[in-house]
Image (cartoon, rainbow, N blue to C red):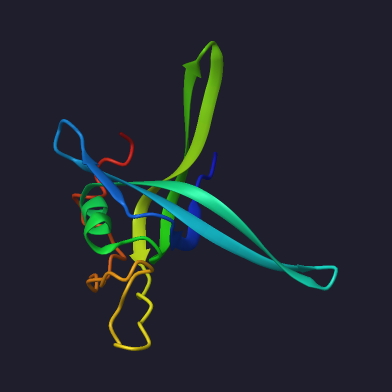
Amino acid sequence: MSLNSVQIMGNLTKDPEIKYIASGKAVCNLSIANNRVYTSNGQKTTEVSYFDVEVWGVVAENCAKYLAKGRGVIVEGRLRQDRWEKDGKTQSRVRISANNIHFLPAKRDDTSGSASSSNGSAFSEAPAVSEPSSEAAVAWDE
């Protein structure tokens, strides 16, 4: 028996990148930063970790449509390790394969009251994406 489950909250470090595979299915790549704040020897310290996230199907399309750099998300999914050979050496990376993305509320601009990203562009308010549709949940094991 094994358990492979991840739940993490963070902010997008760049705009989502969406692609479509030959079958027409959407895949969206996200990069998120997660902050851990702790006190050591009386000093408050922030440790930042960065994670790559892969999202498929309708959820991927919603991420590309409604998310932008700086937006907060909660990612639910599993860890996935990719391995390959390069110059005779085995390379690997671990990323999060998401099966659910929760969009956190956009920060409000103090002057206009409208939602905006860190680069000043307005966010469209996204519908809640707490449950993927049955179409989005079909092919998580590519």
Q: Residue at x 35, y 51 (%)?
A: 99
Image height check: is 105 above or below 17?
A: below
Residue 10 image position (x, y, % from top left): 48, 62
Q: Position of residue 20 (x, y in %)?
A: 19, 39
Q: Quadrant of residue 107?
A: bottom left
Q: Is residue 113 placed above or below 56 in the rendered structure?
A: below
Quarter of the image where the C terminus is located:
top left
Number of marks drawn = 0
* Quarter where residue 24 is shown: top left
Where in the figure is residue 37, as x and y percent of width and height?
66, 67
Q: Residue at x 23, y 58 (%)?
A: 62
Q: Residue furthest top?
A: 88
Which residue is found at the position 46% from the left and 55% from the top?
32
Vertical placement of residue 113 versus 61, above or below: below
- Check the image and report above or below for 33 versus 96: below
Q: Nearer the viewer, residue 126 or 58?
A: 126
Residue 66 percent coordinates (x, y):
25, 63
Q: Is residue 22 found left or right of 5 in the rendered image? A: left
User: Is residue 127 or residue 46 the one in the foreground?
Assistant: 46
| Residue projecting furthest to the right | 41
Q: Quadrant of the N terminus?
A: top right
